């Protein structure tokens, strides 16, 4: 099941986040943090974003030098509390 199907309320917020990052020119996490004040950096260049006022969490790996973003995980805040953000991997269902 696609994330937008599982979390339909978050679909628009995720699309907005995606287009904001697509059009950004962040050179490093510090520049990103100026725009996304609640973003957190964890192991392996992973960044945690709050989506829809912290109702959902998005974990991505960002390589700023190549402007590459890899989605690692998305879910509710309650689901987030049950995972290890440093090793969680995206699983296609």
Image (cartoon, rainbow, N blue to C red):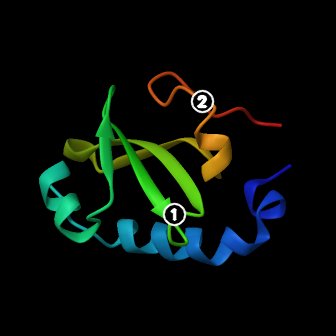
Give the residue displayed 53% in from the left and 25% down from the top. Answer: 84
Q: Quadrant of residue 61?
A: top left
Q: Is residue 58 visible?
A: yes
Q: Quadrant of residue 56?
A: bottom right
Name the one closer to the observer, 52 or 67: 52
Q: Earlier in the sequence, mark 1 or mark 2?
A: 1
Give the residue displayed 17% in from the left and 66% down from the top. Answer: 34
Q: Are marks 1 and 2 in contact (CB under 8 Å)?
A: no
- Is disc 1 surrounded by few (<14), some (14 to 19) or many (20+) residues within 10 Å? few
Residue 62 placement (x, y as % from top left): 34, 43
Q: Secondary structure at mark 1?
A: loop
- Is disc 2 surrounded by few (<14), some (14 to 19) or many (20+) residues within 10 Å? few
Drawn side of residue 8 relative to residue 69, left or right: right
Give the residue displayed 21% in from the left and 59% down from the top. Answer: 33
For residue 83, which numbered disc appears in the image?
A: 2
**Gap in angstroms between the C-alphas marked 1 and 2:** 16 Å
Q: Is residue 28 visible?
A: no
Name the one closer to the observer, 61 or 74: 74
In the depicted structure, whether residue 29 falls above or below residue 20? above
For residue 93, which numbered disc appears in the image?
A: none
Residue 2 placement (x, y as % from top left): 79, 53
**Residue identified by numbered label 1:** 54
Give the residue displayed 76% in from the left and 36% down from the top. Answer: 92
Residue 39 placement (x, y as % from top left): 33, 55
Drawn side of residue 67 relative to residue 87, left or right: left
Q: Secondary structure at mark 2?
A: loop
Name the one closer to the observer, 62 or 48: 48
In the depicted structure, whether residue 51 falls above or below residue 40? below
Residue 72 placement (x, y as % from top left): 54, 38
Quadrant of the rendering where the C terminus is positioned: top right
In the depicted structure, whether residue 54 falls above or below residue 93? below
């Amino acid at each position: 099941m696609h994330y937008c199907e599982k979390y339909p309320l978050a679909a628009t917020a995720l699309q907005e986040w995606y287009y904001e990052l697509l059009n950004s020119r962040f050179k490093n996490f510090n520049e990103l943090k100026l725009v996304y004040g609640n973003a957190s950096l964890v192991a392996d260049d992973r960044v945690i974003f709050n989506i829809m006022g912290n109702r959902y969490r998005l974990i991505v790996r960002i390589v700023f030098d190549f402007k590459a973003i890899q989605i690692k995980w998305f879910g509710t805040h309650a689901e987030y509390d049950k995972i290890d953000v440093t090793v969680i991997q995206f699983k296609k269902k």
